[in-house]
Image: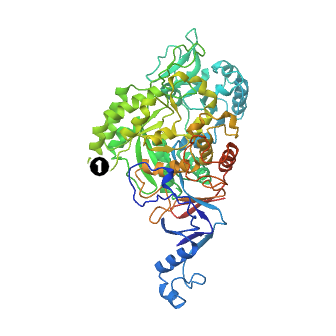
Amino acid sequence: MRLFSNAVVRTFAPRTATNTPAAPTAATFDLTRPAPDAILVDGETIVAVGTRAELLDIAAAQSSTTAALASAGGVGATTVIPGLEIDEIDCSGQVILPGFVDGHIHSVMYADSLTDLDLSQTKSLTEAVAAIRERADSLPVGSWVVGSGWDLNKWDVPDYPDRTLLDAEVPDHPVAMWSLDLHTLWANAHALEIAGIDAATPDPSGGSFVRDDDGQLTGLVREDATDLVARFIPEPSREEQVQRLATTQELFLSQGLTGIHDFDGIAATLGWSDLHEAGRQDMRVTLFLRSPEVPWAIETGWHTGDGDDWLQCGGLKLFSDGALGSHTSHMSSPFPDTDGETGNFGIAQMTEDELFDQAHIATEAGISVAIHAIGDQANHHVLAVYERLRDITQAAEEKFDRPIRHRVEHAQFIQPTDVTRFAELGVIASMQPRHCISDLHLLHLIDESAQLAAYAWPDLLDAGAHVVFGSDGPVEPANPFAAIYAAMTRADISGDASTTFQAHRRLSAVEAIRLHTQGPAFAAGLEDRRGYLAPGMDADFILVDTDPCAAEGLNPDATAAGPDDLLGYASEEALFAHAEAIRDTRVALTVVGGEIRYRA
């Protein structure tokens, strides 16, 4: 057995022991009672949570040395316990929380982003091209220069890049640079030539090659059209990809993640399977499919919820639209005129009927569906798809004897009348708090007159919908504590309160943590095993240096902004002080399956 003691244990366990499909709220958790100071683990399971003395008694009672203990003073002899085999870890007064699970991340893309060129800090087109030229100079002539992170909305002159400068500065390498949101690819002429794309190449369904007034390619490739270039970018060997994934896993563990919902399709399935078989997998992974993989999945008997404790079969990822930063999210109102894009409502990557047809096939096969939808019109169409799918879903649940829980990925902008439909249809809203504050400089693109529910976490919760939090990494950093800060403040990551967007939609740290723990557990059908700390639950938890559940003068029952937008804090300054402390939290230990998988 293993005893973690001298801690402040925030269990997040419901006040009632019954697990129900109803969406709990932070008010379910009692923060007014003194926190336990220890947690006892046997193998991969939590035995008990309580005081150190209580847990030593329990360990003694369950130990094979009970007879020896009786002769030494019986149960309660917690000072000297002869023969008791227990590994005790002193937590030095720090805080134990349930392990965080990132509800939407791309592990393979994240791993690649740690080695590819990062343009996220560039402040101009010229600076970005200079960085690309510098990277090209370090590579053999003719090899691909690949990177990501550019965001024209943050450049000193927010004009779209094109291939003119790339062709002039890097003519001897094919170049492919993903935008920050990963929905637009910036390529040079060499890359387009290798891909066999020229001015006469037609736009594919759900994507486009951007052209100038003369019909010539600018080098910008959007949405599904990016596949026609990306397939020519050399991939790392399987061994190299596995090593990259192992390095990325270590990063995730160091940030307090004990599990992820991974949306990188077959590449992630192969990578995590290799780690698993090599005995190197240290966190739990739920794997999601991409559309081309569905025939293979059905043939091999992939059913959502199958797998083991470490690798679980998830659902099918589909795309309804693009992204806000690339002006490709499907909106009910057009984007402002930019670069001649008059009347641009974004891109519907699939029609409602196309989405339904693919979702129908997957659901009948026992595979849940997760549909990417950022724009309000995209969300409207996706909800219509799920409404049409209700009877099919119910039949699949009966056939496969398990819940089939469909999701909307991102759900950033929602028409007011659609908010309650998430709850009515039982659709999970999988959302990313960091998107709200990273998009602050983009919100001028949204038609205010539409009165959309934007990043409306509390609205959905109040309606009774289930919400899951994640990062969408590498679009955003994976660190969940920065996401909690974003949910609490809805302000720039620097802590500038003047940047706050719609303070009435703030969420407490307690609620944001619940959506990082119980939310993903419910989405994966594992709410009876994970998401909080209690006897019989999986031993997945973290030790941190900051208590996100307590601050001086904080009303622990405040879960949403309330009439003063302060989440129960005495002032805006107090709210931001605690939010920034949470943002900067350091993880001391990460425990998954009862084993210490990361130690600072």
On the image, the x and y values in percent for residue 552 come to: 67, 54
Of 517 and 158, nearer the camera is 517
| Residue that protrudes farthest toward the top in the picture | 214
Q: Amino acid at mark 1?
A: Phe
Q: Left or right: where does residue 145 sit relative to residue 206?
A: right
Secondary element type, mark 1: helix
Residue tagged 1: 400
Q: Residue at x 31, y 36 (%)?
A: 389
On the image, the x and y values in percent for residue 301 come to: 33, 47
334 w.r.t. 47: above or below: above
Q: Left or right: where does residue 539 sit relative to residue 498?
A: left
Of 293 and 463, nearer the camera is 463
364 w.r.t. 260: above or below: above
Image quadrant containing the C terminus: bottom right
- Color style of the picture: rainbow
17 w.r.t. 267: above or below: below
On the image, the x and y values in percent for residue 463 come to: 43, 40
Question: Residue 120: which quarter of the image?
Answer: top right
